Amino acid sequence: MKTEEIIKMIDEYFDGELEKGKEPILFTHLSLNDESREYFKAANKIKSVIGETIEEFPEELEARILYSAASKESRWFNLNFRGNFPALLSYAATVILLIVTLFLYSESINYKNSLEVKIQQVNDKNQMIELLFNCLPQAEVKGSLENPVIIKSKS
């Protein structure tokens, strides 16, 4: 087996996720491979050190946390900015940007309406010009060759 697979199996073993059928394969490979055996010993040492340092939290701690969370008012929107100047500044900037955005949006709607009116006026003028061209009498052009133009090249 590859070393990566064995390391993965060792990690699963210490996490309690290794299938019972794969444990004999793991221990057989550990008896044959020194590098895997050293990794197993290091992982076992880490697990035992962590197990020794775990402290139990007091039973009343959970109750105190729940009571303190329930006793405080739920604050949906807190406007107390006395000690928090960056929060005040960010709220003010947000409000200003919102107002500017609404103003620019309304101006863009006004420009859009104005543009639509101008486009309609141009279309109306274009139709009027076409009507005028169609109302003009047809012109008759007669050509004659009284003065022939002779073009000579310079060479």
Image: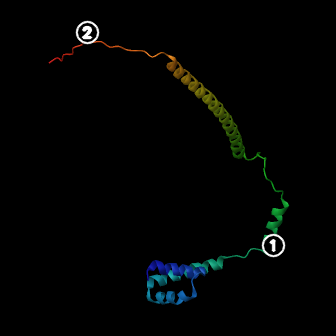
Classify residue 148 by image quadrant: top left
Outermost residue on the left side: it is 155
Instruction: Indicate left or right for 91 with 33 as reference.
Output: right
The count of marks equals 2
Of residues 154 and 20, the one nearer the viewer is: 154
The residue depicted at 63 percent of the width and 33 percent of the height is 108
Q: Which structural element holds mark 1?
A: helix
User: Residue type at mark 2?
Assistant: Asn
Q: Which structural element holds mark 2?
A: loop
Q: CA distance from mark 1 to mark 2?
A: 120 Å
Of residues 19 and 104, the one nearer the viewer is: 104
Quadrant (top left/top right/bottom left/bottom right) for the N terminus: bottom left
Classify residue 111 by image quadrant: top right
Of residues 139 and 64, the one nearer the viewer is: 139
* Vertical comparison of 95 with 125: above or below: below
Earlier sequence position, callout 1 versus callout 2: 1
Mark 1 or 2: in front is 2
Mark 1 closeness class: few <14, some 14–19, many ≥20 residues within 10 Å: few
The residue depicted at 44 percent of the width and 89 percent of the height is 32
Instruction: Indicate left or right for 99 with 76 as reference.
Output: left
User: Residue type at mark 1?
Assistant: Glu
Classify residue 91 by image quadrant: top right
Mark 2 closeness class: few <14, some 14–19, many ≥20 residues within 10 Å: few
* Percent of width and height locating residue 7: 49, 79
Q: List the residue tagged with mark 2.
A: 147
Q: List the residue tagged with mark 1.
A: 60
The residue depicted at 79 percent of the width and 75 percent of the height is 59
* Vertical comparison of 56 with 135: above or below: below
Instruction: Indicate left or right for 124 with 5 as reference.
Output: right
* Percent of width and height locating residue 105: 66, 36
